[in-house]
Image (tube, rainbow, N blue to C red):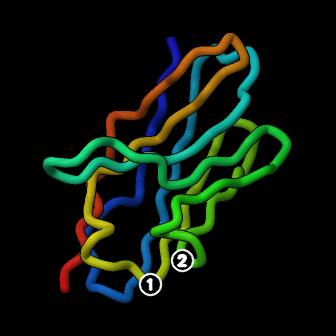
Amino acid sequence: QVQLRESGGGLVQAGGSLRLSCAASGSILSINAMGWYRQAPGKQRELVADITSRGSTAYADSVQGRFIISRDNVNTVSLQMNSLKPEDTAVYYCHILSSTPRHYWGQGTQVTVSS
């Protein structure tokens, strides 16, 4: 049973910062990539950032230069979010793509940016 435990969401004023963390537990033979998606009300879930097992990163254009994804250890990924904007408000989901391949999702953590 694989579980993804997210932490770090909350309420922040525009221009502020938050750091999200996700720790995976359980049996995952090999991880290809870890990342973060978000879903705002009335919108589709979208990729925010991800990082491969080799350390390659990718970011949505809307967060490029403001967010930084890092893999703290083999089963933990973090997202440092700076210069937050109201449009960053969403539920953020941790995601893992295993080598099977199989997708794993966290339960989501709310990020709210006030103007």
Nearest the eye: 3 or 115:
115
Q: Residue sitting at 52 percent across and 59 percent down?
A: 60
Nearest the eye: 26 or 87:
87
**Amino acid type at mark 2:** Arg
**Amino acid type at mark 1:** Ser
Q: Residue sitting at 23 percent across and 67 percent down?
A: 112
Give the vertical position of 5 relative to 101 (above or below): below
Give the vertical position of 1 relative to 108 (above or below): above
Q: Of the residues under marks 2 and 1, which one precedes in the sequence?
A: 2
Q: Residue furthest left?
A: 42
Name the residue beneath numbered marker 2. Answer: 66
Number of numbered tags placed on the structure image: 2
| Category of crowding for the residue at label 1, using alpha-carbon neighbours closer than 10 angstroms: few (below 14), some (14–19), many (at least 20) | some
Q: Residue sitting at 29 percent across and 48 percent down?
A: 39
Q: CA distance from mark 2 to mark 1?
A: 6 Å
Nearest the eye: 33 or 44:
44
Q: Residue sitting at 72 percent across and 18 percent down?
A: 99
Classify residue 102 as left or right of residue 81. right
Give the vertical position of 50 relative to 24 (above or below): below
Name the residue beneath numbered marker 1. Answer: 83
- Label 2: element kind: loop
- Label 1: element kind: loop
| Category of crowding for the residue at label 2, using alpha-carbon neighbours closer than 10 angstroms: few (below 14), some (14–19), many (at least 20) | few
Classify residue 46 as left or right of residue 68. left
Instruction: Indicate the quadrant where residue 9 lies.
Output: bottom left
